Amino acid sequence: MAVWLLLIFKLMKILLNKFGTTLTSRQLGNEAYKALLPTLKDLGATENLEIDFAGVNTFSPSWGDEFLTPLMNSYNHIKVFNTGNLSVHNTLKMLERINQYKFQIED
């Protein structure tokens, strides 16, 4: 008798440019994270989270720390897209180093 296992993966894609193209300040990063929380409630820690930086011109470490660090602490699988912008790239590398976390970069 064959046993079939069906895995259904939930996936959430966050388009950061919906929060603006200049993502700076701790306060604004924290507000963006809090605005996203209700959307995340059904996403389990082992499910996939994708973050797309397309259209983001400025991404500061303070905004990234307030928005991404809680996500990094809650989700095991975070893929990031469109990270070619220098401020995005450098901020992600800084957050990886500080939090000892490795993003899956898909460009």
Image: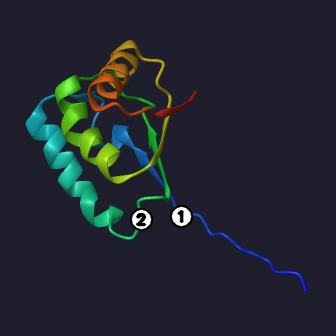
Q: Residue 107 carries which label?
A: none
Q: Which of marks 2 and 1 is nearer the N terminus?
A: 1
Q: Residues within 10 Å of mark 1 (few under 14, many from 20)?
A: few
**Of helix, strand and loop, which one carries label 2?**
loop
Q: How crowded is mark 2: few (under 14 residues within 10 Å), some or many (20 or more)?
A: some
Question: In this view, which residue lies farthest toward the front?
Answer: 1
Point 50% across, 28% down: residue: 82
Q: Is residue 35 above or below residue 15?
A: below
Amino acid beneath label 1: Lys
Point 88% across, 81% down: residue: 2
Point 29% across, 32% down: residue: 99
**Which one is in front, 78 or 57?**
78
Q: Which mark is residue 43?
A: 2
Indicate left or right for 89 with 34 as reference.
Answer: right
Please say if the residues under marks 2 and 1 sit with CB atoms less than 8 Å apart: yes
Amino acid beneath label 2: Leu
Place residue 68 in its image quadrant.
top left
The scheme the figure's colours follow is rainbow
The percent position of residue 46, horizontal first and vertical second, equals 47, 58
State the quadrant of the C terminus: top right
Place residue 44 in its image quadrant.
bottom left
The residue beneath circle 1 is 10
Q: Is residue 17 above or below residue 83?
A: below
Indicate left or right for 79 with 20 as reference.
Answer: right
Q: Is residue 61 above or below residue 9?
A: above
Question: In this view, which residue lies farthest toward the bottom?
Answer: 1
Place residue 40 in its image quadrant.
bottom left
- What's the CA distance linking mark 2 and mark 1? 7 Å
The percent position of residue 94, horizontal first and vertical second, equals 30, 20
The percent position of residue 100, horizontal first and vertical second, equals 34, 30
